[in-house]
Every structure is written in structure tokens, then in C-alpha cells.
Image (cartoon, rainbow, N blue to C red):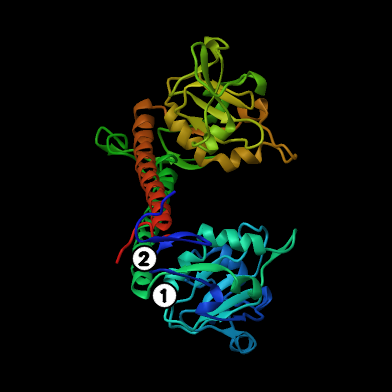
Amino acid sequence: MELKKGYKQTDIGVVPEEWEVHQLSKIGNFNKGKGIRKDQVVASGLPAIRYGEIYTTHHNIIKNFYSFISDEVANESKKLKKGELLFAGSGETAEEIGKCVAFVDDCEAYAGGDIIILSPTENVSSVFFGYLLNFHIIVKQKMQAAQGDAVVHIYANNLKQILIPLPPKPEQTAIATALSDTDELIASLEKLIAKKRLIKQGAMQELLTGKRRLAGFDEKGGVKKGYKQTELGLIPGDWEVTPIGNLFHFKQGVQCPVEKQYTVEAKGRLRFIRIIDITNPAEPNRYIDDPGISHHIIKDDLFMVRYGSPGLLGYGFEGVIANNLFRLLTKKNISNNFYFHYLTLIQDKILLISGSSTMPAINFSTINSLVVIFPPNKEEQTAIAQILSDMDAEIEALENKLAKYRVIKQGMMQSLLTGRIRLV
């Protein structure tokens, strides 16, 4: 295939003609972190990086610190310099070994053992290298250099030989800025989603227990309704507590062997709903032959996991549920959506009554006696459920937006770090 004008073929792929390809040792010198055992970490003190944190708490750039050490421990450790690049020298898999983060702060900080440090001597952008050294063309080379099975290691001598594309410094800076700006956008969305989830959790605690009443339901004849003490705590005076068996009866799902499950929808087949469909919405659908109308569920039906992850709720699905799930069929004129949110709120309590075996499971006779809150006015149930569902929809929209930005960032990295798209 003919190369695009202005590009050249190299050992690591096609790159712009003015980009160089060098071994990583070209840009600086390697040394090691030192010390900082887990029992030497203190609540406050000098900032420090431990090798495991490179995997768990940092992405490409060190922006916050999660470990601190005393002056005495710092004296036995390795002080970092602005612009240094830190690699995790040990890990669990070859795929993750040698993950890199850039230290670009002016503060005093220290690197612990099992960290390999690259101190640039060339005029390079450390932020650019924080992204580049976790890019797939570099990760592939680190995987090939990995040593060990149960615990995987990589060493400075391995890292020195890694081939890197090296754009001119202005282009490094432009690429780093573009990727950093995208990361900031992603981080701000993550914070907003976390905030919205906390707000929703607070709303659930208040609305589903009656601590906060909605306008129009909190008074009668112009007089505010009071509260009463129950076995579930203080609840509105016009609300009740009752065993869940007074509100629902239960019907187990359908047993269907894997060989009779299909990946393609067809006439006479219905979606087969499994636990994974609740926990992972991206999971491809399965279908089974229609077992009969008595087993159908519609979007307003409520169901629960019985085995494995007992108490996990499902709502808003259409099809047939698997036999490790069961439907909650109403005995009264109540809102399934309200009880979807309420039972989600008390899922930990449901888990507690599910037994402590290796495979916890819900016993119908046990859950029948579970005492729950019951607001008799279905209109109030519906109004509460609608507020919480609207919050869920807002969070879902933000999560979809976040997923879109993450895909965009991956595309940007693929285009910018290979020079397919040029910024200068």
C-alpha cells in the first residue's frame, strides 16, 4: 500500500516524516523509587506515590496524592523532580505492567519501591509522555518485555529499549493540551454524575421513608399530617408498615438450557432476561421460544434476583425472566415503580435475610414476612416514583454523554499519538 504523502514507515508503524523514532533511553535517565511500606503511610505528611496507586488511583497525570509519609521515611525514599515519569515495576498481568504516570507538580513528593523513574534530559513534554507511554503501541512492547507469571515484573533495561515516536516539542505540547482538555471534561462529568447520585440517594432516603412529604399529600383540611413511631422508625401518620407478603405474591422465572437460548430475535421468540441483563445493559440480548403468556413480563412489572445476587431489582424490561429471578405480582393497587425504588433502598436488608451460604438465596416464606413501608395513596407512590425516575433519567443521560466523551478521547489518542491528525 502506498504511503500517504508526508508520512514514513517505521518499526512502530506509519508516522509523519518529521517525527523521529527512538528508544526511550534517548529522552532521559532511569533510576528507582525506594521504600515506603504500607505501615509507614500516615494520615498527613509529605506526599508520596506507591507503585500500586499508579494502577488504582492515577490515570496519565498525577493530580492528587493518596499516601503521605513522615520526614524520617522521606529521608530514606526517593524525592521526585517535576517532569519525571513513573512506571509501575510490578503488576498482576503483562497487559498492565509498566503503567506510567507523569509527575508535573512543583510540590515536594516521594516515590516508593517498585517504581521505575525516568528523568527527562531532553526538552520534552512530560504530559505528552504520560499519554504516549500508556498508548497501545507502547503497551504492546511492555507486554513483550514482561517477566514472571503470578507476579509480573518489568525493569529499567526493558523500558530503555522501548521504541517511541517523537514529535517536535511544539506538537507534543499541542497533543498534550488537547488530551488534557478532554480529560478535564471527562473528570468534570464524573464529578457531576457522582454529585447527582448523592442527591438522588438523599432523595430516596427522604421520600421513600416519608421524612419529606410532597406538596398536596402532607396535609388534610389545611392541617399538616403528623408522624407515628413504628418498627421501621418514624413514618407519616397516614402511612402503614406491613409484611411484603400482604402486597405481593411471588412467581419464579423460567428454566431454559443454554442450547435453547438464541442470539437472534425471530417470530415466536421473546427476550430472555438474566441477571447479567440487569448488571450489564450492554450485554447482547438472548431469546427463547415463547413459553406462554403467563410467563410474559411487561415494562411495568417488577422482578428480583433470587440466587447469587439476592435482592437486586429489575424494572422496565419486556420478555421472560430466567428461573434465578422472580416476579413480584401485586395484590393491591400499588405502584411497582415506587417499590422498585423502595426495595432498592433496602436491598442490604434483603441480602441479610438471604442466608450466608456460598450461594445466598431468597426463601419465599422468609421474604414474605419482611416488613416494608406502605403509603396507601397510590397517587403519592406514583408521584414519589416519578421524581426518582426523572433523577435516574438525568443520571443515565449524563452517563451516556460520559461514555461518548471516553470514546472520543480514545479516537483522539489513536489519531494524535500516531500523527494521523496533526495539530501544528
Who's the residue at 38% across and 27% down the image? 377
* Vertical arrangement, residue 244 with respect to residue 267, above or below: below
Element marked by disc 2: helix
Query: What whole-number distance in Å separates the C-alpha atoms at marks 1 and 2?
Result: 10 Å
Q: Position of residue 107 (x, y in %)?
A: 45, 83
Who's the residue at 33% across and 68% down the image? 174
Disc 1: CA contacts within 10 A as few (<14), some (14-19) or many (>=20): many
Q: What residue would you read off at disc 1?
A: 125
Disc 2: CA contacts within 10 A as few (<14), some (14-19) or many (>=20): many
Q: Position of residue 47 (x, y in %)?
A: 53, 79
In the image, farthest residue toward the front: 2
Name the amino acid, label 1: Ser
Who's the residue at 53% across and 59% down the image? 137
Q: Position of residue 356 (x, y in %)?
A: 72, 41
Q: What residue would you read off at disc 2?
A: 175
Name the amino acid, label 2: Ile
Taking the image as drawn, is residue 374 in sight? no
* Vertical arrangement, residue 342 with respect to residue 102, above or below: above
* Vertical arrangement, residue 195 with respect to residue 60, above or below: above
In this figure, what is the number of numbered marks? 2
Circle number at residue 142: none
* Vertical arrangement, residue 62 with respect to residue 136, above or below: below
Q: Quadrant of residue 86?
A: bottom right
> Would you say the residues marked 1 and 2 are in contact, meaning their CB atoms lie under 8 Å apart?
yes
Q: Quadrant of residue 90?
A: bottom right
Residue in the foreground of this view, choosing between 321 and 1: 1
